[in-house]
Amino acid sequence: MCFRNLISTLFSFGRHNTKSTNQTAEELNYTNSKFPISSIYNIRIQYISILLSIELHTGKIVYMYGDENEYFSLVWISSKRLMEIWHPSQRDDHLTTRKKMPGAAACFAQSEEWPVPLANVSIGEYDIGKRSLKFNDGITRTSWLIENGVKCIPLLCSHDCVDEFRMLAAMP
């Protein structure tokens, strides 16, 4: 679990915020191409297949990245429609999201040097009796984009639910 939290911190916040974790300086020593976390775990970023520039309502540009591959596709949805199909249990969890907003702001502030990962979503019926969108990760990043006036949100979606996503995204 600690390893997963550290990796999430590294990918979400870049090198400038890693000192906020409980890891030692030796465990946090890394370069641009390799993240030596311990003698057991070595992570390499092989490539980024998607790099997007997104304009905020202030005119500032932020950058996001993702990996469109055999498992995931890039999809777009309007902010308004996203709020309509987003599963209520995640959408309405404002307390958790509000606490994490300063971290998202810091992440996006340095996105030119360290692009922010795209959120990953899935479509399912879950527990409300109708099809809805749930985030696998990236709720705070997406909420931050919406609060900063982004009209069309990029997301990664697994191939098996892309057609359904596009259908739900297009419905009034």
Image (cartoon, rainbow, N blue to C red):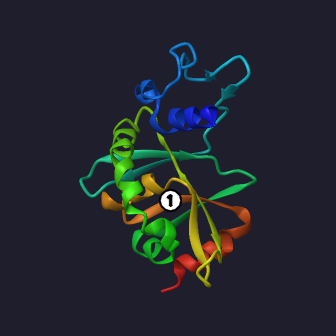
Quadrant assignment, res 81 = bottom left
Quadrant assignment, res 143 = bottom left
Q: Please provide percent x and percent y for residue 9.
A: 51, 35
- The residue furthest left is 58
Q: Residue at x 74, y 21 (%)?
A: 40
58 or 128: nearer the eye?
Answer: 128
Q: Residues within 10 Å of mark 1 (few under 14, many from 20)?
A: many
**Would residue 18 appear left or right of 134 to someone viewing this image?**
left
**Amino acid under label 1?**
Pro
Q: Please provide percent x and percent y for residue 33.
A: 61, 23
In the rendered view, would you say 18 is above or below 61? above
Q: Please provide percent x and percent y for residue 54.
A: 40, 52
Q: Which residue is mark 1?
A: 154
Q: Quadrant of the N terminus?
A: top right
Q: Residue at x 65, y 77 (%)?
A: 125
Q: Please provide percent x and percent y for residue 74.
A: 60, 58
How many numbered circles does the render carry? 1
In the rendered view, would you say 100 is above or below 74? above
Q: Residue at x 47, y 28 (%)?
A: 21
Q: Element under label 1? A: strand
- The residue furthest top is 26
**Would residue 60 appear left or right of 142 to someone viewing this image?**
left
